[in-house]
Image (tube, rainbow, N blue to C red):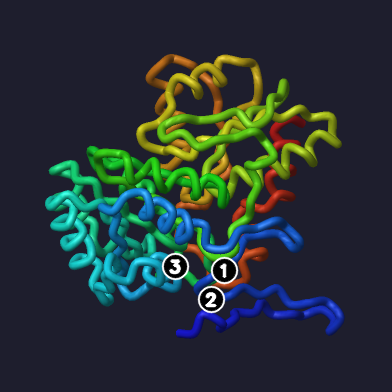
């Protein structure tokens, strides 16, 4: 199916109103006019490989759609096209890691989590090999339906011992995460944002540190704890809520496992409305991670989740879907105002 194929939402109003549309496999969540960086993962992997000759790249017939094609052009002798066989992809990556190489293996997140789980678990995680799984189209980042919407990938992977899980916000997060994932001794799973990825965190004196959550802005009234692209939305909503005289703090947690319990607990200890925001089902992801930390430590706080529902989602244009399922800036603002009313 061509990457240029578009899916259009029906237009039942006038011909003047533009139709919402989204590219089928390279859907972007960037706002019009927003600053973006092209293929940050692919370029970051090339830079890391220039410094570390052990790094190799593999993909399951999805080089173009996971930005692995950037690496393939730079290092053709260190790139391996495994075809549409995710189990083989992970098995080969495990074998390469056993010989001392540092593989980055890319596919769609749905295939990594649903189709090849056992190979990742027993061939990679159980022996603790340095294999880095790169999962494209995480959560609601494509207009396609459940076959390509990995809304439950974190829930599937959180229970796997030894596996580090990273959900980056933007191009800066991805660029800084890649060399740290390569240097991490055990296996990792990166929820990939690809194509023209927004650049957001450069305005907040931010640096990615594996396993650490970072406060991006302080606030007295509300605490947002967010991951992935929802950190961008959290920052946008915080700005809009300021116009309603609501002071919002934003804590970005790009590493879901191992989780930064200490930082989150410190922030939970303040008297504020707590809201988690994630591009993932509310089952088994950031919300339940934060809630689990709170319960285990006796924080006794009510936590409001902004997340995808526990059901298979519709296909359609991304702006429409994000609005429908509560991930849009407007829906976030309204949720907070309703909670504070």
* Number of the label disc, if any, that sits on residue 190: none
* Number of the label disc, if any, that sits on residue 70: 3
Q: Which residue is mark 1?
A: 27
Q: Nearer the viewer, residue 173 or 335?
A: 173
Spatial CA distance of label 1 from label 2 is 6 Å
Q: Is residue 130 above or below residue 294?
A: below
Q: Decide: few, some or many residues near mark 1? Use Cα within 10 Å; few <14, some 14-19, many ≥20.
A: many
Picture residue at 44% right of the left edge, 73% below the top: 64
Query: Left or right of 157: which side holds 141?
Result: right
Spatial CA distance of label 3 from label 2 is 21 Å
Q: Nearer the viewer, residue 339 or 103?
A: 103
| Residue 118 shows in this picture | no
Confirm or deny contact between disc 1 and disc 2 (CB under 8 A).
yes
Spatial CA distance of label 1 from label 3 is 18 Å
- Residue 258 horizontal/vertical position (percent): 36, 33
Give the foreground label among 3 and 2. 3
| Sequence-wise first label, 1 or 3 | 1
């Amino acid at each position: 199916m061509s990457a240029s194929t578009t899916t259009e939402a029906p237009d039942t109003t006038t011909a003047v109103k533009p139709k919402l549309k989204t590219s089928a496999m390279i859907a972007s969540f960037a706002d019009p006019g927003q600053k973006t960086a092209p293929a940050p993962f692919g370029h970051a992997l090339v830079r890391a490989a220039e410094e570390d000759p052990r790094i190799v790249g593999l993909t399951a017939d999805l080089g173009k759609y996971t930005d692995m094609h950037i690496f393939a052009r730079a290092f053709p002798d260190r790139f391996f096209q495994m075809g549409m066989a995710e189990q083989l992809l992970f098995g080969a990556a495990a074998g390469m890691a056993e010989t001392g190489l540092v593989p980055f293996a890319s596919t769609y997140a749905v295939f990594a989590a649903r189709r090849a789980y056992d190979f990742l678990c027993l061939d990679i995680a159980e022996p603790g090999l340095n294999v880095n799984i790169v999962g494209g189209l995480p959560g609601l980042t494509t207009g396609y339906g459940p076959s390509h919407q990995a809304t439950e990938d974190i829930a599937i992977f959180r229970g796997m011992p030894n596996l580090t899980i990273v959900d980056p916000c933007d191009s800066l997060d991805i660029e800084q995460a890649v060399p740290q994932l390569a240097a991490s001794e055990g296996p990792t799973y990166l929820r990939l944002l690809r194509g023209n990825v927004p650049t957001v965190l450069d305005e907040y004196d931010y640096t990615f540190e594996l396993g650490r959550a970072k406060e991006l802005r302080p606030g007295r009234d509300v605490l947002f704890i967010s991951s992935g692209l929802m950190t961008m939305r959290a920052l946008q909503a915080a700005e809009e809520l300021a116009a309603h005289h609501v002071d919002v703090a934003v804590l970005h947690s790009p590493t879901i496992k191992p989780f930064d319990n200490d930082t989150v607990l410190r922030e939970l200890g303040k008297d504020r409305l707590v809201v988690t925001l994630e591009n993932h089902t509310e089952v088994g992801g950031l919300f339940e991670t934060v809630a689990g930390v709170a319960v285990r430590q006796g924080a006794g706080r009510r936590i409001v989740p902004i997340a995808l529902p526990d059901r298979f989602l519709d296909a359609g244009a991304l702006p429409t879907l994000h609005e429908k399922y509560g991930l849009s800036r407007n829906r976030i603002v309204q949720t907070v105002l309703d909670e504070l009313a």
